[in-house]
Image: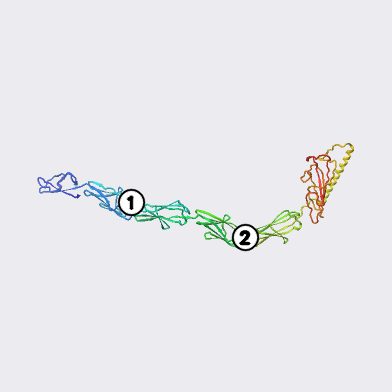
Amino acid sequence: MDSHALVTVWVLSAIGLCLCQNDLQVDAPPYGEAGQRVEFTITNPPPPPFFIVTWRLKEKISNVTAEADQNELAEFNNSVTLTCSASGTLPSFRWFNRSTIVTGSDRVLLDKRSLTILNVTRYDDGPFNCEAWNNISNMSSNHFKLTIHSGPDSSVVSVTPEDPFYSAGSDITLSCSSESNPAAQFQWALNGTLLGSEGSELRLENVTTNQSGAYTCWAYNNKTLRYKISSPQNITVLEKISDVHITHPGDVLIANKNSVNLTCDARGSIVTREWTKDEQPLSSNRITFHEENRRVSISPVQKEDNGEYTCQVRNPVSSLHNVSKLIVNYGPENTKIEVKGEIVLGSQITLTCSAESIPDSTYTWTFNEIEIQSGASYVIQESADEDSGNYTCTALNSITKLRNTAIQELKIQEKPNGLSTGAIVGIVIGVIIILAAVSGLTFYFVKKKGKMGAPKPHQARTINGSVELNYADISHFQRKNVQRVDQGNGGNGETLYSGVRLPSSPAGPTSGQGPTYADINFQNNAAGMRPTLGHGGNVGDQSTVYAAVKPKGQAPRPPHQVPDVTYAQVRK
C-alpha cells in the first residue's frame, strides 16, 4: 500500500460547508493508522458552499527482509551489497553487524536501505541484520552471515626432533600449519624445488647427506587462489667421522736439513681438523697449516719435532682421531762420560759414555789417542799406574753421520798406607816370643806340681780376667779358611801380612775353645804379580804353621768362658 494514501472526507453542515481547515478540531493525532475511527468537530461552521478536509493515514512496519547480492566472497578480492526491504508507511532503515550499528566509512557505504562493503575482509562475515521503522512501529530482519574465504596466512614449519644437525640414518618429521578458510592445501619444496609431496606432514626416513638443505612449505587456498610460502627450515645431515689417518713421506728426516708435510684425511662430513703434538697444540714459526688444517708443513724439522702427532677430526654428530709418530734423526750431542769406582790402585773402574742422539749412537774409546775398545762402557778391572791418562769417547750417529766426543782424565792414586812392614814383623815376633814364654812357664809349673804329689784334675784359674793355661800343645797342620787383614807393601815384591782377631769375631776361629794361634804363611809371588788375598791353606809352596795352647783333657768351654785369643799371620 502506498504510504501516502489520501483520504477525502466531505463534511456537511446545516449552514453550509467548512471553508477553513483551521476551524476543524479532531480527537486524534495528525497522523493515524488505517482502520482507525476519526471524529471531526466544526467549531466555527463556515457559510456554504462545501469545504474540503484532507486526512493522511500510515501503516505499521512489517515483512522486513535483508539479502546480499553474493554470499561467497574472497578476502580483499570482492565487494558485497546488502539490501533491506519492509512493508509499512514511510519506513527508515539501519544495519547491524554482530549487534553493533554499522556506520559509514571509506570502505562501508550506506544508502537508504542498502549497505555496500568494499574489499571485504574475514571480519566482515557478520552476522548481519537490518531494522525498518517509522513513527508508529519498527521491525528487524533475520540474521545472516557472509562466507568470506581468506588466507592462507603465514605458514609455519616445525621439525621433530628439533636439532641443529642430524646424523645420516636418522628419521625426521616436518609439519606445516597456516590459517586459511577453507583449509589450505600444502606442498613441500627443497631448496626452492617442489618435491611432489603433499600434505601438512613430510616424513624423512633414514636420511642421507643429499637430503640436507632448506625445506619450505607452500600453502594454497583454492578459493582465494593465493599461495603462501613458509620461512625456510634448514636441515643438515652429516655422515659420522670414520677412517681417520695421517700420511707423510717415508723419507729419513735429519734435523735442520729436511722438511715434512703431514696430511690428515678421513671419511664422513668433516667440519674441523685440529692438530696436536704430545697432547699440546702445534705452535711454531716453522709450522704452516694448509687446506683448512688438512695439511701441516714443518720446515725445517728439528729434534724438538720428534713425537706423536694427533689429528682430531670433528663434526657436530661425531669425533675421531688418529696418531702418527714422527722421527727426526739428530745428534750426537751433549756427549759425556760417567765414572764409577774408586780411582785408586787395584780398584775396578767403569767408564760409561752417553750422548743425546736418534738413533742411538755407537761409541769408540781411545786411551791417550790410541783406540782401545768399542761400546758404551769401558771397564778397568784392576787399576794400575799405567792406567792413568786421557780417555776419549767418540759418539757416532749412523744416520746423520755426525760425531761428538767427550774426554775424561784419570789419575790413579795409591791406597792410603797402613802399618809398615817392619811394624808388622815386630808384632809377629813379639807374639811368637810371648807364646814361647807361656809354653815354657806352663811346662815348668807342670813339672813342679808333678814332684809335689799325684796329679789332680786340673782347672784353669783366672788372672785379671784371663784364663791361665797349664800346658802347651804345638801342632803343625794346614790352616783352613782363616781370613786376614792385608797390610802394607814390602817394596821388593814380597809382601808381609798380619792379622789379629779375638775368638768372638766372625772372621776368627769358631771352636769356642779359646786357643791362641800364630799363623805364619810364606808365598812366593810370580814376577810382576801382586799378592792375591784370600783364605788360608796350601797355595803353591805356601805352608801354614799354627801354635795353640790348650788346657789338656778338658772339654771346650762355653763362649763366655773362653779367654781372649790372639793370633798373628805373616805371609811372604
The x and y percentages for residue 529 are 79, 55
Q: What's the amino acid at mark 1?
A: Tyr
- Vertical relation: 367 (above or below) 480: below
The x and y percentages for residue 109 are 28, 53
Total numbered labels placed on residues in the image: 2
Looking at the image, is mark 1 or mark 2 nearer the viewer?
2
The x and y percentages for residue 518 are 82, 46
Instruction: State whether residue 285 appears in this view.
Output: no
> In the visual, does 310 lie left or right of 131?
right
The one nearer the camera, 52 or 407, is 407
Residue at mark 2: 329
- Count residues near mark 1 (Cα–Cα under 10 Å), then give few for <14, some for 14-19, many for 20+: few
Q: What's the amino acid at mark 2?
A: Asn
Q: Which residue is drawn at 24% across and 48% down?
A: 64
State the mark number for residue 506.
none
Residue at mark 1: 123
In the picture as drawn, the residue positioned furthest to the right comes out as 451
Element under disc 1: helix
